[in-house]
Structures are given as C-alpha cells and as structure tokens.
Amino acid sequence: MNPTAYALRIGLARGWIEFRATITRPQELFGNYLMVPVVLLGVLFFMRDTTVAGTTLPLASLSLPGVIGMMLVYGPMTAVAVLLSAEREDGTLLRAKAVPNGMVGYVTGMITRTALDTVTFLVILLIPGVLLFDGLFAGGPGGLLTLLWLGSLGLVASVPLGLIIGSVVRSPRAVGGWLFFLSGGLVAISGIFYPITALAGWLQGIAQVFPFYWVGLGIRSALLPDEAAAVEIGQSWRHLETVAVLGAWSVIGLLIAPVVLRRMARGESGSNVEERRQKALQRL
Amino acid sequence: MVMVSAVDSSAHPAESSAEPVVIEARDLRMRYGTLDVLRGIDLVARRGEVVALLGPNGAGKTTTIEILEGFRARSAGEVSVLGVDPMSADERWRARIGVVLQSWRDHGKWRVRELLRHLGRYYAPYGMPGRERPYDVDKLLATVGLADQADQRILTLSGGQRRRLDVAIGIVGRPEVLFLDEPTAGFDPEARRDFHDLVHRLSDLEDTTILLATHDLDEAEKLADRILILAAGRIVADGSAEALARRVAGKAEVRWSRSGEHYLHTTDDATGFVRELFAQHGQGIDDLEVRRASLEDTYMALVHRHEAGQGVEAAAEFEEARR
C-alpha cells in the first residue's frame, strides 16, 4: 500500500483517538463541548418572546442559525490554530516529524478530530435548539442536506486558515487572543445576531468578504422558512454566491496551508522544544 | 587541528573496520550569526557501533545530533547518514532512523500502549525481510519496563517512566541508526542500568548504529565503543574509553613543597622526576604527593577550562597531553 495513503488512514485513527480521549474526560466534556452551547442556548432562551420586526419569527430562531454559522467558522479555525501552536510548543509535532509520513498523519488527525468536534458541537446545539424554538427546519429534510454541504464547505474553508495561523503565530496564548478579537469584530458585522441589512453599506461589503457571513447565511437558509430571506441582502439566500466565496477561501487556504506547514515543520527540532519548555517553566 | 588517528586505529580491532560506514561528517560547520557553534567536525560511525559524543553543555553536541537527524540545516560541510544527506532525505530514510526525543507533556491524554502502537504503525510499510517493522508493542513495553503502565494515561507517568516511553518510541520502528540526546537525564540508577543493557542489546543483536550525546563521562565509558570529546565546536579526542584512559594514565601529577612554596608538575615519568627532584634538593623537599591522572581528571580539567572561556587552548593542551 502507498505509504502516504497509509499514513492518511493512521491519521483518521489518530483523530478518533484524540476525540475519544477528550470527550471521555468529564472536565473536558464540559469545558470543550457543553459549556458554550449551554450558554448560547440560555441566552437565546431568554430572548424567545421577542420577534423579528415585521415577522412572526422569534428572534431566537433567527439567531440560532447565525450562532451555529459563527461556531462553524470560528470553532474549527481557532481550535486548529491553538492546537497546532500548542503542539509545536510541547513537542507533539516533533514526534510526528520523527516518524515516516508523520506530518501527513498528524494533519489528517487534526482535521479528523476537528470535524468530529464540530459535528458533536452542532448536535449538542441543534437538538435542544429545535425543541426549544419555533420555526426551525420548517423547510423539511432538504434543510438537513443544506446543513450538511454547507457545514462541510465551512470546515474546508476554516481549517486551512487555522493551520496557516497556527503555523505563523508562535505562542498558543497569542493565537487564541488574536483570533477572538478579530473574529469578534467580524461576527459583529456579519449578521449573526441581527440582520446584516440593518448595517451601513460599506460594513456589509467588508462582511461579505469573510466566511462568517456566508456560513451564517447558509445555515439560516437551511433552518429557516423561505420568508426569512426577506431580511437578507437581495431578499435571497444566494447559494451560488455562498459556494463561490467559501470555495475561494477553501482553494486559497488549501494552496497556502501545505506550504506554510512544511516551512514551519522544517524549523522544528528538539532544541526548539526544549527552549520553549524552559520559557514555559519560567512562566509558572 | 591534529586528529588522533593513532588512537582511532588502536581502538578498533580489524574486523570492526570492515563494517560499512553508516554516519559520516566531514568538516561540519554551524554558525548562528557571528557565533561559531561547530568549527569543523569530522566523525565516522560504522554499523553496529555505539559512539558517544561527550562534552560539556554548549559544546555543540545537540547541534551535531540535530544536523545528523535531519532536523537542522548546517552552515557548511558534508554529512551522510545511511548514504544519504539528511537534509534532502525522504520518508524511506526517515523510517530507518530512530530519534529519542526529550518529551515534555505531549500526548498526555493518550494511553501508553495506544501512543506506541500508533507511532509504530507508520513504520509498517517500510518493513523488510529480516527487519520487520515495527516491533511488537507489548514486547517492547516489557523491554523498557513499562508493561504495568501500558494502559495508563501518559500524563500520569513519572519522569523516569516518560523517558522510558521516549526510548520505546525512538526504537519502535526498529531503526538502523539511533540518535539519543542525553538519554538518561532524570533516570534513577536502576533505570539507567536497564537502559544501558537495552543499548547494548540493540547494537549487538540488531546491528543498530547508535550515536548518543552526553555530558556524563561515566555513561560514555559504560555505553560507547568509542568516545568523541567535543569542546568549543571541535572534536578534541576520538578513541575507545580504554584507549583514551591509556593515553592519559601514563601521566602523573607530582606535588611538593620547598621552603614554604608549593609546586605542581605533570610528567610521564614520575619515578625519574622524583629521583631528580631529591638529587637536586634533598632534604628541602616536603609534602611530596604523586598521583596518576585519570581520564576523568583530564576530562574535568578540559570542561573546567572550557567553561572559563579557554576551550580552544584547553583542547589544544589536551591534545598535547596525549601525544
């Protein structure tokens, strides 16, 4: 068997082991998977009596898809960037480098794990969401299909971005902070918590460059009835444009990520890891 | 610099020289900015040989090893490991190399057997008749003394147990060349002895060529067929522990005092020197002491002078002393 294909398979197993090792530890199960959905659902629950102006749709039902869209981009991107940066620091990456085709397995493992995490997160958020709020999945099973292709495309667009950021930024503590602020700014203008059409034109323009808006829009199209498109730009779900923009991000990311990753991995050695270890020990 | 080729040949019985060269470096240099870390290293290791790179911290041991592992680009010189330049080597080459890394907190949530099996799987496509890869994981765990910890999460291991796991990971692919950087740092005496047995077994039974960096002379003496002493970016001595000891054992330090002043002289012929001393000064000699210099004395003096910033001179003196 081709060793690269074989390493890909080992990577799938690696992702599963990492996922299982995390979700079976109670403190991580809560911290990584439950806390954010519980808080988000809680906030939406208190907004359940407010309706969107001019419709009978509850604001909570409109926001939930946006929140899911946000987490579909922000979650994988941040998780991958922080993990990669942290695992450079602690020597996980060096271990991968020391075995044949280890980097292929390592990256595959990370993507697999992130995908599993994302699906878990979606399920935890969606099932109570559908039960608690009205008007979700009004369009029937077609919505589930949209959710599936859009979620996949969102992952393919955001994971390479995380890989690039995690390779470029050295400190895992810095990565998390930067991404939080940057994403926070973009989320604010991407129509996640209120319709984007309420914003100034130039802000709408900026928002439409980045994946947050498009994934959010796509998830709304999957979960909400068609009349909800009335508050969107052009009163349409714009699936074609969504595919174009997210596809462009994916292609760019997939082209750049391997180059940046390879360059970053080339610079890793035992003494780098030791140096960072000494620094980390000083911080304690 | 004068290489001690005489020591080299006396250290090797003729049959070991017939083994193929596995690791070779010629005039290897490394410079960071204006700092020369390696100033022209020449080294050769043959199949099945255990070579220790001995030297104080900062002598360039880790840099040398990382260049040979293919983890670091060199500034100049030629390097070949298993006939390939490590910087342009492919994954097939990587599969024949074992690296024992100093772990810290990676894979903490994984279980011991789980990680060893996972990393071993990468080697499976590279097995050959007579050299199946990887090793059987449970046997390997028993060999390094981790059979009882196989199902434990790695973050619950003690420091010594983690190092054993590092060693197991380094050899799981049944390497033809194994690199070890300060392998027994943090080992208790028993773990250290077990580890030494393991290294001997690997070189004797598996024909593994082993290059280990250490600052511990005792470890180098116990493990290595040959010791290279590295100081200030140069190899200043190259030979078996016995050969190096023989070189310096002939030397003796003579101390005495005369009219309240203390004197020290190093000589090859202590008896002759003392006879001469008494012939000249007779009753004036007091506090006479004659001491054979051990390899350790000489090495310690070298290290001490190197750390005082006189590495090159000290190295030159060491050369002198052995001629």
Image (cartoon, grey):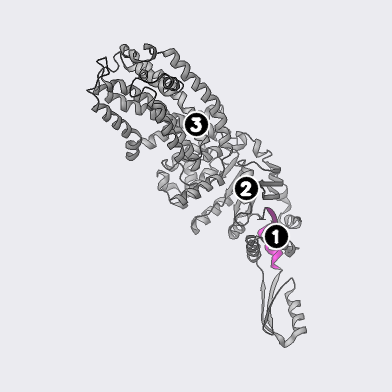
Judge the density around disc 2: few (<14), some (14-19), many (≥20) Cα neighbours within 10 Å. many
At a point 31% along the width and 11% down the height, the residue shown is A227
Residue depth check, mark 3 versus mark 2: number of the one nearer the observer: 3
Q: Give the residue type that dot 2 points to.
A: Thr
User: Would you name the residue on which mark 1 appears?
Assistant: B315
Earlier residue among tags 2 and 1: 2
Report in which chain the residue with disc 2 lies. Answer: B
Judge the density around disc 1: few (<14), some (14-19), many (≥20) Cα neighbours within 10 Å. many
User: Which quadrant of the structure image shows residue B99?
Assistant: top right
The magenta span reads: B232-249
Report in which chain the residue with disc 1 lies. Answer: B
Does residue B242 show up magenta in the picture? yes
Spatial separation of the CA atoms under disc 3 and disc 1:
47 Å
Q: Which mark is residue A163?
A: 3
Does residue A247 show up magenta in the picture? no
Residue B104, horizontal then vertical, whole percent: 48, 47
User: Would you name the residue on which mark 2 appears?
Assistant: B63
Q: Give the residue type that dot 3 points to.
A: Leu
